[in-house]
């Protein structure tokens, strides 16, 4: 039995624009998905995903995607939920040259689903790592990240960047621009997350931005402007002392860029009333800056505040279901049981 766990992430800045080749800076946070992989004698895959919103379920199916699991929940829900685990198993089979390998897979996660904290990437990264290790063919982290990206790319119909999967694999803060992915030094940023209890459909939201961008030059310019502010944010981070407590001037400058980034994302149509309400509650509470994180449409915002004021204000904000401090996860995917 092999167990690996991988972290979720917040976007300091750059989501959506990163899909079109602009740079983005996500940072891994201490909320993890743990995947257990136990090889089987046959070619079946049995998946236990207790944390899924459909009250959790267990399914068993044989190799290949044509054979759908036999469970008592609507097929589209199962397919949506199974997609990433399926894709991870396929990548592991391919990497280990074991097309008929079967597994018992268990997923346990404390990352809310579809909320912009990268639960899909964490499941895929931990899943491929656990399954390849269980087959005795561990991957180096660069290959693991690349295969995890391929898996997300397939499930999301060709609409994915390498940002989530690279960040979840490596941990810490990273910068991603096209296929150029590098860990970066970052100070210990005081992230506060607000969660509206809902979710957004990543594929649909990305497709919406794609359509806007194709239709209006000003939407394409907006995407480019996101890239410009990310480049400015990168310069700020590069000048800061890595690993230290950030000084107030740096926090103020990063926060200003986050505020700007949220405005541009809202212009691109991916914010929501609940996300805007949480962003404003954070700003009113004195956060240095606040923005939605991830695909948007619903889910989470991230704010910078070293005091407790933002977390407290969010917990009293209508539409905010949960507020918590998110520590930077300096370690990416890790083995819990070899
Ligand atoms: N604990 C889990 N078990 C199985 N699948 C999961 C789990 N967590 C997330 N997933 C998969 O990831 C999907 C959400 O991914 P996505 O829409 O990209 O949002 P995000 O990555 O922001 O959480 C879920 O619908 C499900 O398919
Ligand atoms: C919108 C996007 O930039 C980020 C999506 O993040 P999440 O799956 O919502 O955590 C898409 C991508 O980069 O693959
Ligand atoms: Mg995702």
Image (tube, rainbow, N blue to C red):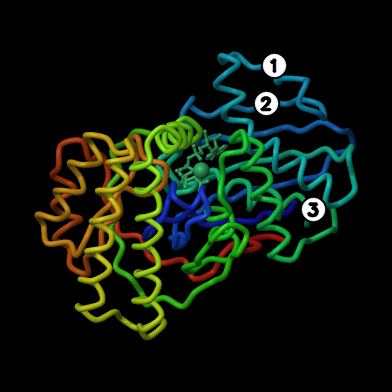
Left or right, 141 with respect to 325, comes to right
Q: Are marks 2 and 3 in contact (CB under 8 Å)?
A: no
x, y (%) of residue 167? 53, 60
Which quadrant holds the C terminus? bottom right
Left or right, 143 with respect to 58, comes to right
Q: Which label sits on residue 59? A: 2
Q: Which label sits on residue 60? A: none
Left or right, 209 with respect to 175, comes to left
3D distance between C-alphas at marks 3 and 1: 26 Å
| Nearer-N-terminus badge (2/3) | 2
Q: Secondary structure at mark 2?
A: strand
| Residue sitting at x 33%, y 70% | 189
| Nearer-N-terminus badge (3/1) | 1
Q: Are marks 1 and 2 in contact (CB under 8 Å)?
A: yes
From the viewer's side, name the closer residue of 318 and 5.
Answer: 318
3D distance between C-alphas at marks 2 and 3: 20 Å
x, y (%) of residue 172? 49, 69
Instruction: Check disc 1: other Cα within 10 Å, few if <14, some if 14-19, many if 20+.
Output: few
* Farthest-out residue, front: 217
Q: Secondary structure at mark 3?
A: helix
Looking at the picture, does residue 92 appear above or below residue 310? above
| Residue sitting at x 13%, y 44% | 316
From the viewer's side, name the closer residue of 226 and 26.
Answer: 226
Instruction: Check disc 2: other Cα within 10 Å, few if <14, some if 14-19, many if 20+.
Output: some
x, y (%) of residue 149? 64, 50
Looking at the picture, does residue 279 appear above or below residue 84? below
Residue receiving disc 3: 134
Displayed quadrant of residue 322: top left
From the viewer's side, name the closer residue of 261 and 72.
Answer: 261
Residue receiving disc 1: 70
Displayed quadrant of residue 192: bottom left
Beta carbon at label 2 within 8 Å of ligand 1: no
């Amino acid at each position: 039995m092999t167990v690996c766990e991988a972290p979720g992430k917040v976007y300091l800045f750059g989501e959506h624009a990163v899909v079109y080749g602009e740079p983005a800076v996500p940072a891994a946070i201490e909320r993890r998905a743990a995947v257990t992989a136990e090889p089987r004698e046959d070619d079946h895959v049995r998946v236990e995903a207790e944390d899924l919103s459909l009250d959790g379920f267990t399914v068993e199916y044989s190799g290949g995607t044509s054979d759908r699991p036999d469970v008592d929940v609507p097929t589209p829900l199962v397919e949506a939920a199974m997609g990433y685990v399926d894709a991870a198993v396929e990548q592991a089979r391919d990497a280990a040259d074991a097309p008929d390998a079967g597994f018992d897979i268990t997923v346990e996660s404390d990352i809310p689903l579809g909320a912009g904290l990268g639960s899909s990437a964490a499941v895929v990264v931990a899943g491929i790592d656990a399954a390849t290790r269980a087959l005795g063919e561990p991957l180096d982290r660069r290959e693991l990240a690349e295969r995890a990206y391929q898996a997300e790319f397939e499930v999301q119909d060709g609409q994915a960047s390498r940002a989530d999967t690279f960040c979840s694999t490596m941990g810490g803060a990273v910068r991603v621009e096209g296929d150029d992915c590098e860990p970066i030094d970052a100070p210990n940023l005081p992230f506060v997350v607000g969660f509206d209890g809902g979710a957004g459909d990543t594929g649909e939201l990305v497709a919406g931005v794609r359509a806007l961008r194709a239709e209006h030059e000003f939407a394409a310019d907006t995407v480019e402007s996101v890239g410009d502010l990310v480049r400015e944010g990168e310069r700020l981070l590069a000048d800061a002392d890595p690993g230290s407590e950030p000084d107030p001037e740096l926090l103020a400058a990063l926060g200003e860029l986050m505020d700007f980034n949220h405005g541009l994302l809202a212009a691109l149509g991916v914010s929501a009333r609940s996300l805007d309400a949480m962003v404003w509650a954070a700003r009113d509470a004195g956060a240095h800056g606040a923005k939605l994180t991830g695909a948007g449409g619903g889910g989470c915002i991230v704010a910078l505040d070293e005091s407790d004021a933002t977390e407290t204000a969010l917990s009293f904000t209508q539409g905010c279901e949960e507020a918590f401090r998110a520590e930077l996860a300096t370690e990416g995917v890790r083995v819990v049981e070899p």
